[in-house]
Amino acid sequence: MATTDGVTGGPWPGRGRPPMVALYAGLTLAIAAGLAAAVSTGVVAVEAGQLLAVMLSPLEAAEGQPVAHAVFWDLRLPRALMALLVGGSLAMAGAAMQGLFGNPLADPGIVGVSSGASLGAVLVIVMQINVLGSWTLPAGAFLSGFVTTWLIYLLARPSQTGGDNARLLLIGIAINSIAGALTGYLTYLASVEQLESLLFWSMGSLSRVAWAPVFTIAPLAVAGLVLLRRQAVPLDLLALGERQAQHTGVDVRRLRRRLIALTALLTAAAVAFTGTIGFVGLVVPHLVRTVIGPGHRHLLPFSAMGGGLLLMLADIGARSLDPPNEIPIGILTATLGGPFFLWLVSRRQAAGG
C-alpha cells in the first residue's frame, strides 16, 4: 500500500525509497543544460566565448559585441526564465488539480481553467480596462481563472471513491466551449490593433517576453509554488477521501478554497503573459508520478521543475524548427500533448478507470 510520501508500493518495488537527492540533482543539471541551450540557440548565433563575455557584463555591452549582448540580455535570457516560470506554474497547478479532483486527467487546459483565465485577459484587452496599471491584465486573468476553477469543482466534485473521468471531461468541454464563444464574441468586437494580441492569446507564445513581464510573473509564480508545496500532506490525506481526511484533522472546506485559489493564481500568472499553453499540466505530473509515486511532497516540486524544463525545451523547438519563423509554442505543446492524452485515456479505460 502506498504511504503518504508516495514511495512504498510505488514504481520502485523492493528497492525502498528512490534516490531523491540524485533525482533532484539530475533534474537541476538538466535544467541548467536546457537554460544554456536556450540562451545560445536561435537565428543569431552566439558563440561560447561571446556568451561568457556578455554574461559578465550585464549593464553594458562588451566591447565589439553589442548584438550578442542585446540578444542574450534583452531577448533570450528573459524568455528562458519565463519558460521556466510558466512551465513550472502550469505543471504544479496540474498536479494540485489532479489531487483536488481525485482525477489524473485534470489539467488547467483540458478542464477549462486556462480558457477561463484567458477570457478574463481578453476582456481586459478588448474593453481597455486599466484599473491597476500593469497588474490589470494578470488580475483579470486571475479573477476569471478563480471563478472558473471554483465552478468546475462544484460541478465535478469528486466522490468518496475518486473523480468521475467522463463527468470531468464533459464539464471541461462545456467550459472550454463557453469560454471560447465569449472570447470569439470579444474578438468580433476587437479593433484591428487588438486582433494581433488576441491571435497571440489563442496560440500561446513566448515571443513578446521581456524583463517587465518576468518581474511581474515571478513573485506570483514563486508565491504560488511555495504556498502550494505546503499543502502536500493535506493533499495526500484528501486522496483517501473527504470524510477520511476530515477524520484526520484536515479542514477540507478550507483546503479546497486554498487549492482553488493557488491553482487559479498559478494558471492565471502563466496565461496572463503567454496565452494558452496546453497539456503541460497533464503530461508532466503523470510522468513524474510514474517515477516517484503519488506522494505530493515530491510530486509537486518535481512537477514544477519538469514543467519548466519541458516548456523551455519546447520553446527551443518552436524557435528552431522553421527559422527564422517561429511556431507558436501552444501549437507545439498541443501537438505533443494531444496524442499523450488520448493514450492516457485509452490506458485508463482498458484498466477500467
Image: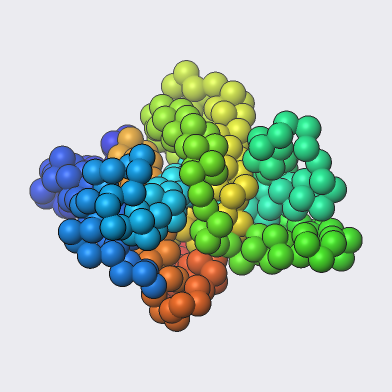
In the rendered image, the residue lying farthest to the right is: 189
Which residue appears at 64% of the width and 63% of the height? 200
Tell me: 262 left or right of 167.
left
Which residue appears at 52% of the width and 34% of the height? 220
* 74 vs 281, nearest the viewer: 74
In this view, 231 is above or below 239: above
Tell me: 318 left or right of 175.
left
Q: Position of residue 343 (x, y in %)?
A: 44, 73
Q: Position of residue 268 (x, y in %)?
A: 61, 44
Which residue appears at 61% of the width and 29% of the height? 257
* 46 vs 172, nearest the viewer: 46
Q: Quadrant of the N terminus?
A: top left
Which residue appears at 50% of the width and 77% of the height? 325
In this view, 167 is above or below 241: below
The quarter holding residue 42 reads: bottom left
User: Exactly how many numbered labels are in the figure?
Assistant: 0
Tell me: 117 left or right of 221.
right
Q: Is residue 250 visible?
A: yes
* 110 vs 41, nearest the viewer: 41
In the rendered image, the residue lying farthest to the front is: 64
Q: Position of residue 69 (x, y in %)?
A: 35, 53
Q: Is residue 142 visible?
A: no
Judging from the image, the colouring scheme is rainbow
In the rendered image, the residue lying farthest to the top is: 249
* 29 vs 98, nearest the viewer: 29
Q: Position of residue 118 (x, y in %)?
A: 68, 52
In the rendered image, the residue lying farthest to the left is: 15
